[in-house]
Image (cartoon, rainbow, N blue to C red):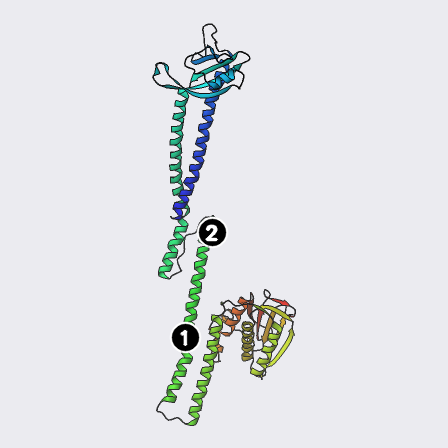
Amino acid sequence: MSLRGRLTLVAAGVVAVVVVLASTATYFLMRHQLYSQVDSQLTEHAKNPYANSNGFNPYQQDYVAIVAPDGERTADSAAIPVDVQIRRVAGGQAHGFFRNITVIATGGTGTLPMREVVVPISGQGAVVVARDIAYINHDLERLRLVLVLVSLGGIIVAAAAARLLSTATLAPVRRLTEAAERIASTGDPSERVPEGGSDEMALLGASFNTMLAALEESLETQRRFVADASHELRTPLTSLQTNIDVLRGSVELDAEQRRRLLDDLHRESQEMRTLIAGLLELARTGATAEKEQFQLDDLVEDSLERARGRFPGVRWEAGELEPTIVDGYPDRMERAVWNLLENAGKWSGDGGSVEVSLAGGDLEIRDHGPGFAVEDKPLVFDRFYRSAAARSMPGAGLGLAIVREVAEVHGGTVVAENAEGGGALVRLSLNGAARAGQTP
């Protein structure tokens, strides 16, 4: 059964229960009122069974019988049967009571429903007063019929209203379902569902649109990443293929030409290796891994030693390296720190200097190179972006992009700016994952 059908059934069921309970209560309340009125009149009549003031008898529709203490009738109406219960009251062995009885009508033409009261008379027996209550039964039958019709009508109206209400309420859900089915069939998450209002369904629609926007952005990023990666891989692959074809060709090469070709192959293979490593690092950024505690200051010192060996002509100055504990991924952080140091070393050149400091969860690396051009600064952390000045240098434009990805994975940020006095300053902030101290 559909959700709309279940909502309709539940709403109709609740209304049915309420209507049936209300109708039942109304019926028994009216029945009690009618019987109470008759019982009150019968009791008054029993107090004066032969009321006949000035020839007027207000109880002329009643039947009266008087039963002696020995159970014999002293005055009666033949329509009233005297049984054991009445004799017990007359003999003082039981209390008076009210009850419904059925008697044979005069002439034996049928039966009559009657309401009867039996009232004891101290030492004189009991008075029995009965009244035909066919009119009450008729009224109660009509009341039952009316209540049944009202109940059925109420249930039908409630079911129809619940159907309309569920249809209107579930319309946003239906739109979401249709949108999801279209997206699944077309693979295009650019579609959006209409938003409006402030109820839960409107919030659901807004959340669905937010999810679609995130999915669209993710797919676009993936497509862009694949396109950029394909483009970046094509260049070194083409160069490798060309050099290999030359080496395998029929043209005779002297030793110097062969050496240059082999050097080109080695350089291109190294660039391919670096590019693939960067792509793998970006691809696994979103992968789940178990975090662990590590000393960021120790990691920075190790990376500095590596940078001194890689760039011996650069003066590496380690300022304050505050003991810092980080909850995260040490291998990824090591790659990010190395990318920052390598980038600073490339732009410093022989005779240049790089200052490195770590304090308050912020790692700052400042070089004395040309700094960032105004048009390059907003793009330096984009994947595969290379400034005009960097295109003549080795690299694929992934180093700073990896730094940004690693910073975000650790709940941090990275910013690039030009330092006072020249050069570039890159600040990697890990306030969310870093704290001062030594690991136990």
Q: Amino acid at mark 2?
A: Leu
Q: Is residue 26 visible?
A: yes
Q: Residues within 10 Å of mark 1 (few under 14, many from 20)?
A: few
Q: Is residue 386 visible?
A: no
Q: Residues within 10 Å of mark 2 (few under 14, many from 20)?
A: some
- Counting from the top left corner in percent of width and height, residue 312 is at 58, 84
- Counting from the top left corner in percent of width and height, residue 330 is at 56, 72
- Counting from the top left corner in percent of width and height, residue 13 is at 42, 40
Q: Give yes or no for contact between labels 1 and 2 (Cβ–Cβ under 8 Å).
A: no
Name the one closer to the observer, 13 or 405: 13
Counting labels gives: 2
Q: Quadrant of the C terminus?
A: bottom right
Residue holding disc 1: 231
- Please say if 343 is above or below 200: below
Separation of disc 1 and disc 2 at Cα? 41 Å
Q: Is residue 36 left or right of residue 183?
A: right
Residue holding disc 2: 203
Name the one closer to the observer, 117 or 212: 117
Q: In which image quadrant can residue 303 be found?
A: bottom right
Q: Amino acid at mark 1?
A: His
- Please say if 290 is above or below 150: below
Callout in the foreground (1, 2): 2
